[in-house]
Every structure is written in C-alpha cells, then in structure tokens.
Amino acid sequence: MDITLSFKEIIQLLKDHKQFIDLSNEKQIDEDNKNSLIKNLSFDSREYQKNGLFFCKGANFKEEYLADAISNGATSYLIEEKLLNKLNINVAIPGIIVKNSQKSMALVAMHFYGYPQKKLRLIGITGTKGKTTTAFFIKSILDQQNGHKTALFSTVSTDVGNGSFPSTLTTPESLDLYCLMNQAVEQGYTDLVMEVSSQAYLMNRVFQLHYDLGIFLNIFPDHIGENEHPDFEDYLAHKLKLFKHSEAIVVHSNTLALPEIKQAVTENSAKVIWTGIDQENQGDIHYTLGETENHEEHVTFEVLENSLLVTGEPLTKTNFQLNLFGSVNLENALVAIAATRYLGCSEEEIQKGLAQVKVPGRMEMIVDSKRLIVVDYAHNGISLKKLLIWANSYYPKGKKIVVFGCPGDKGISRRKDLGEIAAQLADYVILTEDDPGFEDSLAICQEVGTHLEGFVPFEIEIDRPKAIKKGLDLTESGDILLVIGKGSDNFQKRKGINEPYLTDRQVVEDTLNIVSE
C-alpha cells in the first residue's frame, strides 16, 4: 500500500508534541512545498528515497550524508537544533529544525505508518539476560491460541511474516520499528513480542510506545561504558522506564535492585504479577517453581500458581516440559507462563508451546563420544555463572572448558565480569574474538586474561574457528565444552562491517563431521 504524509502535517505533528523549533530556508518554502507529499522516510543516506524526508541524526553525522540523501531523492530533511549549529548546511530543500531528532523520528514514523502498534497486542521484555529466550517462549505459546499470529523482534531474529531474518539491533530504530509493525499488521498478525533494550530508551527508539504487557526479567551491571550507560544507576533507570509504559507488568523477583524495582511498582499504576524461585518469604509472589526433574533430552518442572492473590482461588500446581536445561531457562519459562496466563492462554496451550519451542543459539547441545558441547549466547558474567553452575551439576567429574571473547566498543565491564567468573568456575579457558568492532581483538583478549591469570590456565587464539577446534581437542569423555558469546550469529562485527561467519555450531559440527538434522 502507498503511504504518504504532507510536509505541513509533519510540522503540525511536531508542534503538537512540542518538538518543532523552526524551518530552514523558510523564505523558499511556499504553500506547494508545505502541501507536498512525503512518500519515504529514511535515516540512511545511501537508500533510494524519492519524495522522502531524511533524518539527520547521530554524533558522527556529516554534511555529505545530507547531500547523498538529496542525490538519492530526498526532498526535505529533519535536523536537531544543536546538530545544525555544529554544521554548515546550505541546501535548497526545506528542513525542519527540532529539539530532539530521535523523539521526532519516532513521532513521525508512528504517524506515517498509521499507528500500527494500536492494531497489535504488544508484549515488551526487558532485562540484562534472558530477553531472547523469554520472547521465543512467549511467541511459541501465543501461537497456540486459536486465531493468533505472533510477530517477533528479538536480538537473534525478526519475524513479521514470510519467514524470519537476522536482526541488526535488539530493538529496531523507530523508523524500522513502525515499518515492521505495519508489515506485521498487513500479514494478519495479532500480537507482537519484542525485546526492549536499555539503549532503546536511551536513544528514544521506543518514545511514546506503550505495551499491553511489560516484562522485567532482571538487572545486573552491564552495558556500562563510554558508548553506553555511564553507570549502573543510569542503566537501571532506563530499564525501569518500561513500568511507565505498560498496562500490566510481570516482574521476576530474583534479581538485584529489588528495592528500586518495588519503588517503580509503587510509583506506577500498572498491574503487577510477581514470579520467583525461592520457597521462603514468597509474600505476594504469584508464580514460583516447584520440583524439577532432568531427563536425557528435556526437563520437567512444576509451577505453583498462587492465584488466590489474583482470582481468590487456592494454590494450583501444574507440570510442564522444556527442551532447554539450566535454572536460568526455567526462570524464563516461569515468567513466560505468568505472562501468557495473564494474556488468556490455557494450561494446554502453554504446555504445548513450551514443549516444542526452540531458541537459536541458546543451550544448543551437541553430544559426541560421551562429551557434551554447548553453544550458547551467554555474553555476561551472570549468564556464564549460571551456565557453569549447571555444567558442574550435570557433569560434576568432567573438565569445564570455555571458549569465549568479548565485543569491542561496548559492554566494557563484561571483560572483568566474564574473566572473574571463568576464573572461579572453569577448568580451562580459550580466549578468542567476538565482534571486535573497531578495537583490536588481541588487546581485548589480553585485558580479559588479566582477570584469569593465576586462577585458571588459559590461552589466546584469536581465530575463532581455530579456538573452537582447540577446545574440542582438549575435551575427553565426560568433559563439557562451552562455546559462548555468539550463539547463532553468522557474522563477526569488524570495523563497521558484518563479516560472514559459519556460526559456532557449524564450526563444531564441521570439525566433528556431524550432519545437522
């Protein structure tokens, strides 16, 4: 369908939301300009954008980007006042000067695409770890509901119909976000499950977006650094914004910063559903884990539903099955059960959805000659800790060998956290590259190594496939090899380019001559 928006309509929209400041080249803007139709929105100067509005944004924005956009068909542009003051822009097309380009982009995008968020049931998930797994769990369950189709925005993949494709951001930029939502609506989707990162709030990608149900999984120090959050308090503050934008919210109580989370609950009017894993001092916990039992290819677990707090009915116990092991996955499943119960799913729909769900890059297990290889996306200290605790309980006598790296340009604190956890719980470590970006892979590995030295034997092998093969060579019967950090990623981010990569699982299978089903 053709979508259009007049230049005048955009100006009025921004005035209504107190973002509009002025027009550039105002004397050259006549009524024909103001009534001209905008048929494209873009923030990428390389895109074809005939009759388009181009958004100038970013700390590294250059004047030539606007010139490129004009050569590709842009007929107007939008720019933040402080960015305009830094540049010497002299172009013939009209420009809109605003207070905040990211907020303005979100407002224009949702209006341009006809507010598709109002045509979907929105579930937003935030947390330091577990967002992707929980999103896949919820999607699988909701898809069991008769007449429901669930779209997905996750770190791993995006699905709005006609198959899924790899994601570039955990939460898309607002232009992409509303374009994809619109596609989902056109494809007949009824629900959308999306991960909401702290960066999404920091960068105003989800400005004025409201959720039918929000989910707060946990909070641990992460994403703290020069290009992200200045400190943990800022990171937490942006995570907690989800409370202000959700009609109801599921909160998992086993996390840091519980007093601050409870304060956010008090300050907002959203209905809150609590989940937890401890039997003592449950208080107002609505859902908690009961007994669990590990089987060869799956785990069965019991959920205690204290619906007395919700419906006045007594405590009930229900059994579920999951094909992912580890306490963290059971916690994510517990949250997914609470969420989908609230959304009206039956016990049978939840059981079926959980039993058949598969999450790319999460606890992917490969068994060979009685050794176990696990490929997992674990990319911070708390995730690795949970994984190694599970490994030690699963194969208590075997060596735990870990292959991992840390990304460049972000999450600097992970280097210390991952190093210290590996030093405490692993038997041998091989450091390698993991999306080095604009940093040097060897320097990153050496920094991580400072937290391993003297505690656990380790080596550095920058070439990731070679590092994985070394790990395989070191394993014997009864050992576990954990290859973590990239999950199902089929690329390495290096100097602004996504270079093709086989995926960790494929490297393992090629080395062991295993043919995937």
Image (cartoon, rainbow, N blue to C red):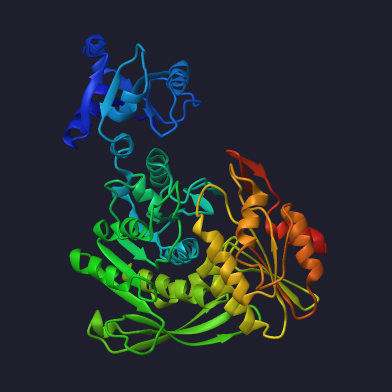
* Snapshot quadrant of residue 477: bottom right
Residue 180 position (above or below residue 458)? above
* Snapshot quadrant of residue 147: bottom left
The tally of labels here is 0
Residue 329 position (above or below residue 72)? below
Instruction: Identify the residue shown where x is 61% and y is 48%.
Output: 436
Q: x and y percent of residue 354 in the render?
A: 50, 72
Q: x and y percent of residue 328 in the render?
A: 50, 74
- Residue 515 appears in view: no
Q: x and y percent of residue 156 in the render?
A: 54, 54
Quarter holding the C terminus is bottom right
Quarter holding the N terminus is top left
Instruction: Identify the residue shown where x is 57% and y is 65%.
Output: 418
Q: x and y percent of residue 210 in the render?
A: 28, 53
Q: In this view, does 330 lie to the left or right of 281?
A: right
Q: In this view, does 423 lie to the left or right of 41?
A: right
- Residue 493 appears in view: yes
Instruction: Identify the residue shown where x is 47% and y is 16%.
Output: 71
Residue 168 position (above or below residue 325)? above
Q: In this view, does 123 lie to the left or right of 295?
A: left
Instruction: Identify the residue shown where x is 78% and y is 61%.
Output: 469
